Image (cartoon, rainbow, N blue to C red):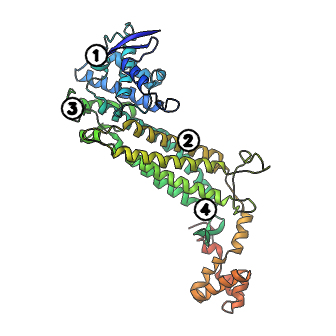
Amino acid sequence: MTRTEHDSLGPVEVPADRLWGAQTERSRHHFAIGVDRMTWTRPVIRALGLLKKAAAQANVELGEVSAERGELITRAADEVIAGVLDGEFPLVVFQTGSGTQSNMNANEVIANRANQLAGRPLGSHAPVHPNDHVNRGQSSNDGFPVVMHVATTEQIVHRLVPAVTALRTTLGEKATAFDHIVMVGRTHLQDAVPITLGAVVRGWVAQIDDTLAGVTATLPGLHALALGATAVGTGLNAHPKFGATAARHLATATGEPFHETRNHVAALSGHDAMAATSAALRGLASALMKMANDIRLYASGPRAGIGELRLPENEPGSSIMPGKINPTQCEALTMVTVQVYGNDAAVAFANSQGHFQLNVYKPVILHNVLESIALLADAATSFDTFCARGLEADETRIRQHLAQALMLVTALVPQIGYERAAAIALAAHREGRSLRDAALASGHVTAAQFDEWVNPARMAGLHPQTNVDR
């Protein structure tokens, strides 16, 4: 059950009930690579629809396409934007490096649907032609980069930022709840001077804030669109005002300040904005990795490890050891961050491979950036829901560790000097004595002096009246 479609190379048999055309079918035949997991996702299909709608609106406004054709294209593009036609986008990431086949997939689907709406049969190419009308004023070389920027921007704004912000809000609340808890600080994986658990958690919050700000700081680069560049950046066959006009329509449709790029050649031959976004996503992943590793180390044990944090008991942790509970949300989050690091390496290398007037690694750049965004957003939501919200402090365990901490001796340094304080700490460690006993035995400190000077809460920066971290 096929129909015959045509492109510049001749006739192609296409499934009769599908909206795509000859070039999409050729791509399906020639690029069966990664079919199981790498077909285009909703954000990309939506961006293709937004691009084609904005182009049609601009071409009507500029007199390049008739109002009747523009209306048909807009109606079909609206269905693409809404997700009604997602099944008509079957192509994979590993195709032509310019994204030409995905661009033509959108052109063919929208043209065929527009002609359906006009009462014409599929494959008629009239009254709407995929190249002459849907693709008017565009090349795949500038159209696909627009899709890259639009899809990435929307996913950052509407998916990543809300998910990570929710996690940081939960952690901020935990920090406040833990402000009164004084615990052993640790550097070099060794005991250090005291710190509050609230300060520890607030440190994670600050890292998340900074790295998420780093991601959103890349948005202005993504707002610059290659519209109007056409094939090599010269704007051949596009109305001189097409780029600015179409960008204006895209900005209206999305609520994002999209605008025409200041240099079309650079916009085609390199994707520095995408690479910068990917690097910033890696930075966010780094902060999340650090937090997740800290949490699972603080929760290690629970009896033979540090055991100062208690994690929610979500599922059994072992098929052989009864009662074992593992820090699975930490493990999932850190695996996500490893994947994001790998994705960024692929994006950075792909971006370095622009030759002359075109970078032909566009689809793999887009795929890896969008995967990083989706993974980080999903992992942040999962971690927030199933770990951060149920995070508890084992205050008894924390007090036990604090009472044994040798680095409380640091409070004696201003009073008796570094070398005498070091001798006390080493004696306590080597002789298995408490720090207080070793200090009194040294003859340099009285019991009253030790109790006055060695105050863990004050050392951790707690205000003596409010007992809140300064």
User: Compared with residue 255, is residue 27 higher up or lower down, i.e. above or below?
Assistant: above
Disc 1 + disc 3, Cβ < 8 Å: no
Cα distance in 3D space between marks 4 and 1: 62 Å
Does label 2 or label 4 sit earlier along the sequence? 4
Q: Amino acid at mark 3?
A: Gly
Residue that mark 1 sits on = 67
Does label 3 or label 4 sit earlier along the sequence? 4
Picture quarter containing residue 253? top left
Cα distance in 3D space between marks 3 and 4: 57 Å
Residue that mark 2 sits on = 378
Q: Position of residue 236 (x, y in %)?
A: 20, 29
Q: Circle 2 sits in a helix, a strand or a loop, which is it?
A: helix
Disc 4 + disc 1, Cβ < 8 Å: no
Q: Amino acid at mark 2?
A: Asp
Mark in front: 3 vs 4: 3
Report the residue at 64% width, 72% height from top: 457
Does label 3 or label 2 sit earlier along the sequence? 3
The quarter of the picture where the C terminus appears is: bottom right
Q: Position of residue 141 (x, y in %)?
A: 30, 32
Cα distance in 3D space between marks 3 and 2: 40 Å
Cα distance in 3D space between marks 2 and 4: 26 Å
Cα distance in 3D space between marks 1 and 3: 23 Å
Does label 1 or label 3 sit earlier along the sequence? 1
Residue that mark 4 sits on = 198
Report the residue at 55% width, 51% height from top: 168
Q: Amino acid at mark 4?
A: Gly
User: Compared with residue 385, is residue 84 higher up or lower down, i.e. above or below?
Assistant: above
